[in-house]
Amino acid sequence: MFRRVLTISTNAYREAVRARVLHGIVALALATCAYAMVVASLTLQQPRVLANVGSASLSLYAVLTAVVLGATSLHRELELKTIFPILSRPLHRHEYVLGKYCGTLLTLAVFIAIDASALFLILVGYAKSIPLAIGTLAGSLVALGVLLIVMKRQRIYALVPWSLALVLVSYWLAAPAGENRQLVASFSILAFAEVSIVTAVAVFFSSFSSPFLTSIFTLGIFAIGRSADTLGNLPPKVFGSTLHTGGVVVAKIVPNLYLYVPARPLLLDQVSGTPVATYVANAALHSLCYTVILLIFSAAFFAHRDFQ
């Protein structure tokens, strides 16, 4: 089973990385990092503004990428009719769904790592040395070029180890940035946990719906999830008991995505009784539980889908 899921995952990753829409989102995310530098230059607390704007944009673009990839990955197989020879092999449908999900999640992990690395390197320039940041970036591009040459037949996968190494090195170099480095790192982990749920939601809807409706439904769940705290605390005196009860029910069913965009003091260990490590771990567990449930339902719906 593991080998079959791994094969589907690597194929899904390869298709996602080659998608032009992903290249556009990556370029837009990096352009937003540059824009954050411009905004930060107009303030007195440049690293703080940069970390706040950069982290918010990272979370937003990661969710957008999850929606796009999750909604189109399965439909692309149907449109090209490549799903028929795939499912005709000794492969269970739930393995196919799990492989597609894992491949999409791997793509998102690379995306988040590259975006977070850009933010860390900018923080290095502000807190330590601009030449060091530029030199690290140049060195990383040279290393990527070497990987592309060495991995001739598997060049598409060179981004995985390269992005992981880059984010670790840039995180280490950004140590002088202090709390701003911690903020970006925590937001990156929470963004990955959030897109794990969003991708699972997109895979769930794509198992029985069209890409357009999948995108609409997923964005709707995302909007409701980000407002779950508000819906669960609607005042009965203002909205009435019916809307209050409905809001509480929806807030309990839909994943509370507001957990993944906490206030800055919480991620900097400035809230007593709530260590950031514990908070991030609980958020990751929350993400894992919803992801498993959604994938189970996705596999069940996809198993009974008729492709004729």
Image (cartoon, rainbow, N blue to C red):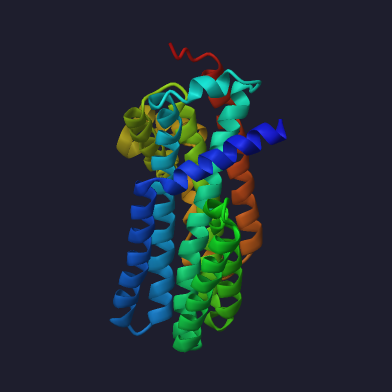
For the residue pair 60 and 45, the one nearer the viewer reads as: 60
For the residue pair 31 and 92, the one nearer the viewer reads as: 92
Left or right? Give the position of 10 relative to 209. Answer: right
Q: Quadrant of the N terminus?
A: top right
Q: Is residue 307 above or below residue 44?
A: above
Kindly identify the residue that appears in the image at 47 percent across and 30 percent down.
249
Residue 26 occupies quadrant: bottom left
For the residue pair 244 and 80, the one nearer the viewer reads as: 80
Residue 161 occupies quadrant: bottom right
- How many tags in the picture? 0
Pinpoint residue 54: horizontal percent, then vertical percent.
Answer: 41, 66
Kindly identify the residue that appears in the image at 41 percent across and 35 percent down.
71
Q: Quadrant of the C terminus?
A: top left
User: Is residue 50 visible in the rendered structure shown here?
Assistant: yes
Pinpoint residue 119: horizontal percent, then vertical percent.
Answer: 46, 71
Q: Is residue 281 above or below residue 122?
A: above
For the residue pair 224 and 193, the one nearer the viewer reads as: 193
Pinpoint residue 88: horizontal percent, then vertical percent.
Answer: 58, 18
Q: Is residue 305 above or below residue 103?
A: above
